[in-house]
Structure formats: structure tokens, C-alpha cells
Amino acid sequence: MSCPLCEHQNNKPIGEKNDHQIVCCLFCGFIHVNPMPKSPQLEELYDQYGHTESYLKKIKKKIFTSKHKLKKLNKYLNQNQNQFLDVGCSIGATVEAANRLGYEATGIDLDKKVIKQAQKLFPTNKFQAITTDELVQTNIQYDLIYCAEVVEHVPDPHAFMASLNKLLKTGAILYLTTPDAGHRKVPKDFVSWNRVTPPEHIGYFTRKTMSLLLEKQGFKVIKFKWSHRTNMRVICKKL
């Protein structure tokens, strides 16, 4: 199977976990599951994701933390830029945080049950059990997209990032987080890293491979934010 990022076919096996082979592309360095799971398999997996209860226990803290992050992102926006989208919103804590900061806030997720719960918890916000490709068909665009811990789950990162680009207005901001495969704390035995969890996490980005993806899909990286944890946080703008 060719690399999902650069399409070259020279992959080096680096280990196996949960009956999935993990490889590294010898051309661009992207680490990924080979072969990638098909979309129907993943939709079934996330329709019953199972993290809702743990999120509910921390809902107040999550809203507080999200407000803090969004306030820092405000400096990249104008006052009239208030259309907010959370991709992979779960029970809606970040959507509610955006609402409290004055955004017109929307959240989407593949899990139909969690979307119903989010709408019940935060009825003044808009939630949909829909994919980014399906949302693109509505022709609605946003000023700020928040996409936390999602891109590592998708089998086609280019198609996913292209859909995010279409959902953003020109000059709008994308805030994206994902596990950082190039972080100094990642173990030398890569598959022993606790963020390697196929078929849940199937793509593992470094700053280099994330920059390649973003630039290819029409984004300019503004800043990679430092993290003492093995997390990547990047702010970028649609060109």
C-alpha cells in the first residue's frame, strides 16, 4: 500500500500492535497503519466510541480549559469573525465554551448517541452527527475550526484536510491537535508508545509531516505550540 501522505510505496515496517502492522514511509517519514482500515469499519468503531462517561465527569473542567484555549486564538481573528466549528466535538464542551465567548457555535461528530447527549446538555448550540464531507455540501463556512485529536483517526488525511479547507472562509483559522510522533518523550520502541492504539489511531504525525499535509491542502502554518506532553498543537490559516 502507498503512503497516505506522499503516495510513495517504499515503507519500512517498524512493528505490530493489536494485529495491525505499523510502517514508516521512507520518502516523507509518515508513520501509519498498513493497510489502512476502510471508512465503514471506522464509522462503526466511532458510533460506539465509549469515552462519553469519562468526558461527562470532567465536563466543567473541559469547558474551562477550552475557554482558555479559545481566548488565546481570538487574537488571530477579527471581531466580526464569530462562526465556530468543532470537528469531533464529543459531548460538546468546547462548543459550549465557544458559545460563552460569543461565537455562533456548531459541533459535529460521527457518534450519533453522543451528539444527542450534547444537544441535550447544551440546547442553545447546534450539533450534527455528520462527516466533514457531508457538511461541505451545505455550503456553510466558518471563521474558526477547532479539530482536537481527530486527524490521527482518519485513513485519508489529504481528503480530510481538504474538507476542512472547504469549510473555512479565506483567511480563517484552523486549530488542530494530534499526538506528536516526533516528540522527545516518544519511546525509541515506537509501538510501545501509549498513543499507538490501532485501529483507533492509524496515522502518526511529526511537525514535518503535518507541515507537508497542511501546505499541500492550502494552509499556512502560523505556529506550532510547545507542549511538555507528547501532543502536537498547531495554529494555521487558510490561504
Image (cartoon, rainbow, N blue to C red):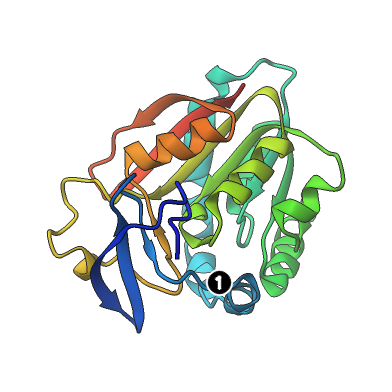
Task: Decide: is 224 above or below 196.
Answer: above
Q: Which residue is tagged 1?
A: 52
Residue furthest toward the front? 9
Q: Residue 81's spot in the image, x, y percent?
A: 72, 22
Q: Does residue 193 appear left or right of residue 21 in this picture?
A: left
Q: Quadrant of residue 98?
A: top right
| Quadrant where the image shows the N terminus | bottom left
Q: Does residue 100 appear left or right of residue 74 in this picture?
A: right
Of residues 35 and 75, the one drawn nearer to the viewer in this rendering:
35
Q: Residue 183's spot in the image, x, y percent?
A: 22, 46
Residue furthest toward the top? 78
Q: Does residue 164 appear left or right of residue 150 in this picture?
A: right
Q: Is residue 88 visible?
A: yes
Of residues 72 and 13, the one drawn nearer to the viewer in this rendering:
13
Q: Residue at x 48, y 26 (%)?
A: 72
Q: Residue 174's spot in the image, x, y percent?
A: 57, 34
Q: Residue at x 41, y 51 (%)?
A: 8
Q: Residue at x 32, y 68 (%)?
A: 22
Residue furthest toward the bottom? 19
Q: Identify the element where label 1 is drawn.
A: helix
Q: Amino acid at mark 1?
A: Thr
Task: Decide: is 173 above or below 23.
Answer: above
